[in-house]
Amino acid sequence: MTDAAVIELKQSWGRIAQRLKAELGDDLYTSWFARMEPEECVDGRLAVSVPTRFLRNWIETHYAQKLLKASEAELGHLDNVHVKVRTRGVPQRPQDVAERRIIRDEMQPEPQTRMAQPQPAQALLHQPTGERGSPLDPHQTFHSFITGGSNRLAHAAAQRISESQPGLPVSFNPLFIHSAAGLGKTHLLNAIAWRVRERHPERKVLFITAERFMYHFIGALRSRDTIGFKDFFQSIDVLLIDDFQFLQGKSMTQEFYHTFNSLVDAKRQIVIAADAPPAQLDAIDQRMRSRLMGGLVVDIELPELDLRREILARRLAEVAKRDPQIRVDPDVVEFIANKVQGGGRELEGALNRVIAHQQFSHAPLSVDLAAMVLRDMSANPDQCRVRIDDILKVIGRHYNVARADLLSPRRARSVVVPRQIGMYLAKKLTPRSLPEIGRRFGGRDHSTVLHAVRKIEELMKSDDRLAREVALLVRLIEQQ
């Protein structure tokens, strides 16, 4: 296609996207079409691409005619629409480039295609349960889960379910755990699965994400074997579903509703994890919300200070086992616990950043160093907004250098070093680009800024006094 044709196709695709959004609504459009891109339109054949096989399969199954009609409204008559999975720099295998067509009259899977497709339900019945679901993490057990006031109820409920006896009425069904990302939902689902398998190996336990549930359902539709799909899921004793908020599509949620009802009525246990409570899940209907809220709904809140301390202590002990030479001062651990108010992933990430920075820069592992490294992890986003004017003010005051001198061409050492430190701090503490920093420091070139940043970084590795001085400047700038 010529450049003009490419531009015209992109403009047409923008209008097609608006038609789809108007017909489907913002939520459905965002879920299924937001990442679709036009590739070419040649000889009555429109080619579009999506990033995953799952998206391609879902669109082909549920939105074939809508996509075709919206495209024809802008491009005129089309013989077909070819949906493919795009790759970025990775060559596709021959079976991955087999043509997938959305035909005007009907949508049938091509019998000779060798492309990997969702497995038919009958095939699932002959696999071990673990292979049908999502993989379990062997490190996510009750033993490794650290409890505190913010997660104690969810932990207790999960333990109660994992220790319940087969055949006896369950205390609450379903158990619905919701929280922000990284606070332990998936950990608890894994822990339940491991404990039930350990105590009652005869029970069928399935841990599965909502996306994989949809994948299997699409396989059942393609093979016209929804009965096998129902039989498989309704045979499970303990069903654990993660990332439930990603369950999309009317037919999909209806099928889950029927599966859910049959398991609950048969006294089988269901545990669901999502990032929002049932009342805030717009993709499911009121009947499903009511059933979910009929069990026990618990949330996991952000960890309190004592729990953050315990999480850091546990992670630090694990790091020390791997490398006994790593030592972190208790004051640094206390600073991280107070600074980072997120979940276990954020705390572990903050600890790793501080240790790595110390190892690479060879600077003393102090509270000042931790403050500089974790400056962007403030709980209050407003505290992260450092201005270059603030940096210039603090640098000028600290080194007793006039602002006009910092911005001037002067090359005296008493001016050059503070100026370079200022550029280094501007790069580390603000989102400004190198050219923009250069302009704000007297119209300098971006290469000058890059040289200053690299020089200060090198000096800090061998000059402990300078490293402490820079850390002090960071704290002074944060107080502006």
Image: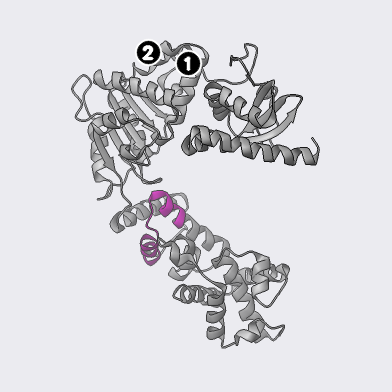
| Relative vertical location of residue 433 with respect to residue 32 in this rendering, above or below | below
Q: Is residue 217 left or right of residue 91?
A: left
Residue 34: give its label: none
Q: Is residue 225 left or right of residue 195?
A: right
**Colour style of the rendered protein structure:** one colour
Residue 220: give its label: 1
Q: Is residue 284 left or right of residue 29?
A: left
**Residue 39 belongs to the span the image colors magenta:** no
Q: Which x, y percent locates residue 82? A: 66, 25
Tag 2: amino acid: Asp
Q: Which x, y percent locates residue 298? A: 26, 41
Tag 1: amino acid: Ala
Circle 2 Cα neighbour tier, 10 Å, few/some/many (<14 / 14–19 / ≥20): some
| Relative vertical location of residue 20 with respect to residue 214 in this rendering, above or below | below
Residue nearest the observer in this picture, 26 or 226: 26
Q: Which residues are magenta?
A: 331-350
Q: Which x, y percent locates residue 242? A: 39, 34
Cα separation, mark 2 vs mark 1, equals 11 Å
Report which quarter residue 115 is drawn in: top right
Element assignment for label 1 = helix
